[in-house]
Structures are given as structure tokens and as C-alpha cells.
Amino acid sequence: MIAGGILLYFTIKRVIYKQIDNSLITEKIIIQDQIEDTDTIPDFEAALGHQIEVKSLNFPVRNFQAIKDTDLYDSKSNSFLACRYLYYSGNTIAKKGYIITIFQVLSEKEELLKDISLYMFFLFFSLMLISILINYFIARKLWRPFYDSVNTAGNFDIQLDKPLDLPYTDIIEFQQLNRVFDQMTTKMRNDYLNLKEFSENAAHEIQTPLAVIRSKTDLLMQQKVLNRDSISLIKSINEATTRLLKLNQGLLLISKIENRSFHEKKKVSLKKIIEKSLDNYKEIMQIKKINVEFEALDDALVDMNEVLAEVLISNLLSNAVRFNIDGGFIKCHVDDKYLVFTNSGLPLTIAPELLFRRFQKGSDNPQSVGLGLSIVKKVAESYGMHITYNCIDTVHEIKLQYRSGIPK
Amino acid sequence: MKLLIVEDDRSLCLSITDYLKMEGHVCEIAYNLHEAVNKVADNTYDCVILDIGLPDGNGLDVIRDMKANKLAGGILIISAKGSLDDKVTGLKIGADDYLTKPFHFAELSARINSICRRNNFLGMNEIIFNEIRINSNDNQAYVNDKLLNLTKKEYDLLLFFMANRNRIITKESIVEHLWGDDVILTDSFDFVYTHVKNLRKKIISSQGRNYIKCIYGFGYKFSDS
């Protein structure tokens, strides 16, 4: 564009100058003809914008023509004007020399040049602008189905039972794209469901052999002839079995939550559930000398599955008790927007967000399976609740915000 | 007690039978639905321990069959699935209790005893062990006929011990019995220790003997030997 503009400028300039030169030459020819034909120096009025000088000499001169630029002093405007002039020296028939000088003031032509260039430039510029805009709008319209498809595919959630809702398009290539996305996501979802079913079935199947192990060790324990070594061995088996059990149960629970096995909902009173849970832990908290404060709005009702609510609260409270220090405190606050558990404890050694990951343990306890908080997170997520864990020094706080508030 | 154990896993079935026999119960076995239905038709049992996942059908049908034929006896469902629907359905159609596999035998014992107590109107309202007596009608415990002032958990603990007399029970099974399955408890089993200690103290201060023996490595045994 810019290169074109520059080229244009010089081209027009050349054109104009050529025009000027041509008119200079034409004038000169007219005068020359007149001089050479009639052998007289003519008298004439200077044409507008032209200054013509004719000088006659008594001796012959060499034929010479040149067109050059110069500045002429203009008394009227008291300044120098840029001019282009033609200089011609020739001879009459009578071999008498004469010189013709024709001056053309350029300012007008310069103006013209400037104007033309400017207009041309603006023309090209707007053309370019319009062309860009048109391109942009066409491209947008053209590519819209592509971007829509890509967006939709990008938002695909394998856990939702919703098929990919790709926008209709009559462009063959994008239809193809949509088809591929559909096939791919369907296969992904099927594989995922198969895997889930398999792991759930596997977990169920594991229960029975585990029951057998536990039953045998239970019997083994009752035997009269057990020495210290045997006891120790059986104890280890018991511990490992229990751990396996809790692990299995925890994973099954998470899997069932994802499966929406707990789809029944009702208006659950968190206050009642917390009270029940606190009662359950009453003695433990007494032994650990933990001070408990509980405040709740009577109407803190949340629309969710009752069993899951109990699991949620139980896990939260169990955590608050387990990681507490002797003589510590637990504060619980429930209102219609959120639920907060605050407790004292040892400072965290890992980043709070990591605690919600499966098998992430906050302690080195071998009995701890590390699923508690990830179960809490899973329950929270399935109801669109927002959960955060904050730890300032030795004070831990878990806050759960539920979207559905009090039913009006 | 006369018990019927309906369980298709032979190994597990054998374990359960062995354990219950140790308690002095008479045990009979059925490995599938067909056998179970036949057995309940021919005999009367104080309690049927019923696995739902049977190879030839759903164990719940045994319950329906028993109720349809107005057969007496307690029913304890054991199941690996732990499905809430199964539990609700089972209890609704007439089962007395529901226990999820895997379980502690001590828990199984306690549940069976509880069912039998509830169903048996004649006698068996009381559980007696030497000078300790528990009356399940008013949920009170007595030592030498003197009332013991126990908290709920201490009462449950005593009941648990007495239902599993002369057998070793692990601290784990006590924790699960007192605080439930979901309660993921503690680093140490100090709480169990404290509760046991308190219970012992109360019994002794009422001139009762201490039957709660500490068993190295495992837990406790409630016995007078």
C-alpha cells in the first residue's frame, strides 16, 4: 500500500512534469516556427502563468534545448517562485541567433500534484479499509460454525450424560468436523462408563474375599495357642485388611456419588445432622478436651440427599477432631448461605488445595486412607457447592457455600 | 439359638458357622435360594442370616417367602453391596436388621443377639453374666441388682461385651460398633481405652468383678476365666 502510494506520487509527478514540458515545448515550437519562417522576432503577450523571453543575437548560435528547474524572483509577492523553464537557442534563416526562454510557474501544478496524490492516497486507503472490513465480516460469518463447534467440543464434560450439541451447518467440511467430534466424544463417554462400571463391579467383588479374610483372622484370634509372634502377625493382617476395606468403601462411595446413585433429594436440615454428629463425637471431644461452639440458623435447609449430607458432615467433623490438638477448639457455624468448620490444629505442611486430592493425607497415620476430604469435595461438587480450605498458622477453616439457599 | 446361615461363598459361610458354633449356637447352612426356602419350610429358626447376592436369585425372596408363609424367626441381612435401596427394601419387607460385608464377627454376634432378644417375648429380656444383668426393656444395667449409672456409649459397650462373652474382640470392632461405619477414627484407639476404663471403674465401684480383660495385640475379652 505504502509502496504503491509512493510509486503513485512519483508517477503523477512525472506525468504532470511531462505535461508541463510538453506545453513548454509546444509553445517554443510555435515561437520557433514563427521566428524561423518570418525571420522576425514576434511580439506577444505572455500567456497566463508563462513568462516568455525572446532574445535576438547578431551571430549564429549552436542549436540547443534544455528544460530545467529554477527559482524566479517575483516582485509582487516578494518571494522566489519555483519555475520550470525551457531554454532554446536557434538560428533564423538569415543565420541570426535567437534564444527563447519560456518560464512555467510550478506552484499551481505543485498544488495539483499534491491534491491528486492526496485524493488518490485516501481513495486507496479507504479501499483497503473497506476490503479489510468486508474480509473480516465474511470470514467471521464463514468460520462461525467452525468456532462454535470447536467451543462446544472444548466444553465437553465426560462426566455429564449429555450428548454433544453441535451447531448445524451446511458447509460440508464443518459437517465432517462435527461428525468426527460426535464420534470421538461418544466413544470417550462409552469407554469412561465401561471403566467406571468395571471398577465399581471390581470394588463390589472385592468385598467378599475381604470378608473372608476378616472372618478367618477373627477366628484365628480366638485360638488358645497363640504366641507373641502369631499375635503380632495377625494384628498386622487385621490392620492391612481394615485399611483395604476403608479404601474400598471410600472409592465405592465416590463412584456411587458420580453415578448419581444418591439422586434422591429433600430439604435437609444441616443443623440437625451436625447436632447428631457432634453428639456422636461427644465423648471423644471430652477426652481430648476440645471445646466446641456451634451456632446455626434453624432454617438452614439444603436441598440434597440425606445420606450424603450425613457423610459430608461426618467427614468434616471427623477431620476437625482428628487433626485437633488436646485442649483445642472446634467452631461450627451454619446459616442459609454457608457452613464453616473452624478448628485448631498443627500447621499445614502441604498446600490446602492439595488436601482435597485422593489419597492425599494430612498426616503420616497409616490408618488414614486419605479419602475423607476428597469425599467431601465430591459431595460438594455434585450439588454445585463451593468449598474452600484456609489455614492461618494453626487455625484451620473449611467453608462450604451452597448455591441453593432457603426455600422461600 | 438355632440359626440358618444362607451364604453362597463357602469359605465365608464356614467361617461364620464356626464362629457362631463357638458361641454355642446350632447352625445350619444353605448355599442358595432354593436350599434356603426348603430349609425354612422344614425348620424353625431363631434367626436367619441371609446373604442377598445368591447365585440363583435374590435373597430378599426368602424374606418374602417367609412372610408369605407366616414363618417366625428373626432375619439379619448380610450383603456386600451396601446399597441403600436394598437396605430399605429389605427392612420394609420384614427383615430385622442389615449388616454390610465385611463385618466384624463381634458385630454379627451382637446383632443376632439383639434380634433374638427383640423377637423372643418369653425370657431373654435380660442378659446375664454372673452378677451383671442387663434389662433390655428399660435399657438399664445392674450389678448385684444395684443400678449402674452408665452413659449411652458405656451401656452399648457393656452390651457388646456381654453379647460376645469369652471371645476376643478387637478395638476396631468396638469403635465401629459404638461410632458407626462412617466414622473414620483416630490415630490411636485411646478413646476405646478410656471408655473401657470408665466402664470397668463403674462396675468395680458397684462391687462387681472385672471381666474386661486386656488381650495383648488385639483388644479385649469379656470373661471370668
Image: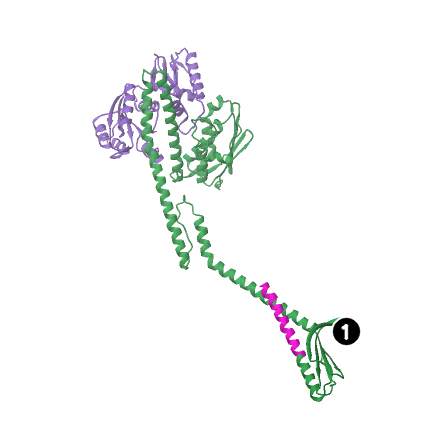
Chain colours: A green, B purple
Q: Residue A179: x and y, percent?
A: 38, 53
Q: Residue B67: x and y, percent?
A: 26, 31
Please tell me which residue is depicted at 36% across the width and 12% down the height of the picture: B131
What residue type is disc 1 on? Asp
- According to the picture, the residue beneath numbered tag 1 turns out to be A74
Around disc 1, counting alpha carbons within 10 Å, would you say few (fewer than 14), some (14 to 19), or many (20 or more)? few
Residue B51 sits in quarter: top left
Quick one: A109 or A278, which is closer to the camera?
A: A109
Residue B153 sits in quarter: top left
Quick one: A342 or B122, which is closer to the camera?
A: A342
Q: Quick one: which residue is furthest to the top in this view?
A: B207
Quick one: A395 or A213, which is closer to the camera?
A: A213
Q: Which residues are magenta?
A: A1-24
Residue A8 is covered by the magenta coloring: yes
Quick one: B186 or A23, which is closer to the camera?
A: A23
Q: Residue A396: x and y, percent?
A: 53, 31
Q: Is residue A238 left or right of residue A319?
A: left
